[in-house]
Image (cartoon, rainbow, N blue to C red):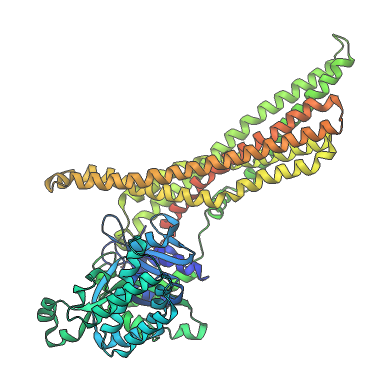
Amino acid sequence: MDCGPAALKSLLEGFGISASYGRLREACQTDVDGTSINTLEDVAQRLGLHAQQMMAPADHLLLASAHLLPALVVTVLPNGFNHFVVAWRTHGPIVQLMDPATGRRWSTQRRFLNEVYHHSAPFDARAWRAWAETDGFVDPLRQRQAELDLPISIMEHLLDVASADEDWIGFGALDAATRMVTSLVRANGIARGNEAAHLLGELFEQAHQADAATAIIPEPFWSARPLPKRTNAHSYGDNGANLLLVRGAVFLKIAGVYSAEAQASAPSHASDVANDEVAIAHPAAETESAAETDPTDSGAGAPTAATHSSILTAALAEATQRPEWEIVRALRQDGMFRPTLLLGASLVAALSVTAEAALLRGFMVLATDLHPGGWPLSLLAGLVAFVLFAILLEFPIAASAMRMGRKLETRIRIAFLTKIPRLGDRYFHSRLISDMAQRAYGLRQLHALPDLALRIFRLCCQLIFTAAGVIGLFPAAAPIALLAVLASVAGALLMQPVQNERDMRVRTHTGALSRFYLDALIGLMPIRTHSAERTVRREHEMMLAVWARESLSLARIGALAQSLTALMGVGFAASIMLAFILQRGETSTVLLLLYWSLNLPVLGQSLADAVRQYPTIRNNMGRILEPLGAPEEEMGL
C-alpha cells in the first residue's frame, strides 16, 4: 500500500470528503514507487482541504498551543525509508495515528516524536527571527517552559530578553536551552522548578553571549543555527552568512475544509497560503526531495497537468465500492429464484432442528401413557418421514450453495482476467506483481461465500426458534431469552469492524510477503551477483515479523469474541434455569428447557465463528474490486 495516498484518503475521510483510493494513487503517483509531499499538498488543496506544507521544531508538533494537528507527518521507518503518517489528535500523553503500515495506532507522544523525520534546510536569518516572534513559536515555547514548572516571572523575563535581541540568537538560544533542560529533566538529571529554572537561565545567558553558541549547548538541541562554514563557502557564496540551518519536522497542516466559494480559487501550492507561520513553511516547500518517500517527483510515470484534474474529479465522483453489494449484484445475474429458494429451505431446516427436540419430548410423554407395543403405526410413520425429510433437505441445500459458489468464483475470476490486460502501465507502476498474484489466488475463497451466508442465516433462525421454544415452555424467561439472542447477534456484529481492520492488515502483509517468494524465483541470479542474500533475508524477516504480529492480533480478537459470546451465553442459560427452579416450573419440561437453554450459547458461539470468517472473504473481494474498478487504458487507432 502506497503510504502517501492512503494517508491522504484517511485525512479526507476524517473531514467528510469521500474519494477513491485508486484515483488518489494515480494522482499522487510519481515515476517510482514514491509520493512527493508537494504532490500530496497540491492534491489535498484541489480536493477541498486547507492544507499547508510546513516545517517546525519536532517537539512543537503535538503541543496544543501550536495548533498543528491534524497533520500528515513524515516519519522514518526502521529500514531508513521515509513514511507518511496521519497524526489526528492527542489524548493526554497518547497521540491518535493512522499509519498505512499498521492501520489505526495509538502511541505515546515521546515514542512518536522519536519516529518523526528531522529535515534540515537553509533559511534566511531575518525571516526566521521575524517568525520566532510570532505566537506560532512563542506559545509552544512558553508551554514547554511551563511543563518544567518554571515560575511565570522567570519565563516572562527570559522571553523579554530574547525579544529585545534583534538578532536570531536570542530566540534560538532560548529554544535550545529549553530543549536541553527538558531532556535533562526527563532523564532525571535535574528536578523541575527552581533547579530547572536556574540551569535554564545559566545556559541561555552563556549561549546568548558566546561567540560559538553550539560550544555551550550541543548541536542536536538547536532548531536553528548558523550554516557550517564549508556550506557557506561552497553553496551560497556571500549570502551564506545571512542564512541559518533550520531543523525540524516536515508535515502538512490541515486547517479545515474550504468553503464552496473558496475551493474554486484554492491555491495549488503552500507558498500561496499566507498565515503567521508561512515563513517557516518555506524550507520544506523548497526542498521537496527531503520530505518524499522517493527522491523523485516527476517523470514518465507522473500524471500530466491535462490528466491531473480529470483524475481528481473522478476520485470525488467515484462511488465507494462495497464488496457486499458487488457480491449481491454478481449473484443476481442468475436470477433471485435460486437464492430465495435456498433461504426458504434453510429456514425450514432450522425449524426442523428445533422441532426435533419438541417431538422427542412429546414421544417421551407418550411413552409414559402408552403400554409397550401400543404405539400407533401412523405416528411411527410420521416420525420416520419427518426425520428423512430433515436429512434429505440438507443435500440439495449443500449442493445448491456449492453450485452458486462455483459460479460466483468463476464469474469474478473471468472479470479479473479480462480486466488485467486492459489496464495501463501506470496502474502497475507502483503495484507489486506478487501482490496482484496474491489477489488472484485469494479468489478461491469466494467459493465458500454462499455456504457461509446460508450458515449465518440458518444459525440466526435457530437462535430465534430456540428462544421461542424457551419462551413457550417458560414464559417468565422471555426477557432473558430475548436478551440472549440480541447479545449473540449484537456481539457478532459489533466485533466486525475490529475484525475487518485486523484481517485487512493480515491480507495486505500477506500480499507484500509473497513478493519475496517471487523475487527468489525470478531474481536469484541478480541477488547472488550483488551479494544481496543477507539484505533480502533481513527484509523478509522484518516483513514476516510484522505479518506474524498482525496474525496473532487477529487470532486474539477472534478468541476474545468467542470467549465473550460463550460467557454471556452460559450466564443467560444459568439465569433461565435458576428462574425456573425458583418459580417451581413443571418437571416434565425441565429437560427440554435445559437443553434449549444450553443450546443458546452453543448457537451464539457458532454464529460468532461463522461471522469471524466473513472479513477474510470480504477483504479478498475488496482487493479484487480495486483493479476491476480501475480505468482501462485508452487504445489508439
Give the quarter of the figure containing the C terminus.
bottom left
Decide which of 291, 448 is in the foreground and name it. Answer: 291
Decide which of 555, 351 is in the foreground and name it. Answer: 555
In x, y percent, where is residue 549?
A: 40, 45
In x, y percent, where is residue 533?
A: 18, 44
Choose top left, top right, bottom left or bottom right for residue 608: top right
Choose top left, top right, bottom left or bottom right for residue 352: top right
In x, y percent, where is residue 58?
A: 34, 70
Q: Is residue 599 left or right of residue 622?
A: right
Decide which of 44, 411 is in the foreground and name it. Answer: 44
Q: Is residue 353 left or right of residue 94?
A: right
Note whether residue 68 is visible.
Answer: yes
Note whether residue 352 is visible.
Answer: no
Q: Is residue 91 left or right of residue 434?
A: right
Give the quarter of the figure containing the N terminus.
bottom left
For the image shown, how many numbered marks are present on the structure?
0
Q: Is residue 198 left or right of residue 212?
A: right
User: Could you tell me which residue is drawn at 51 percent across and 65 percent down?
Assistant: 319
| Residue 534 drawn above or below residue 188 | above
In x, y percent, where is residue 392?
A: 66, 27
Choose top left, top right, bottom left or bottom right for residue 595: top right
| Residue 420 drawn above or below residue 343 | below
| Residue 91 drawn above or below residue 364 | below
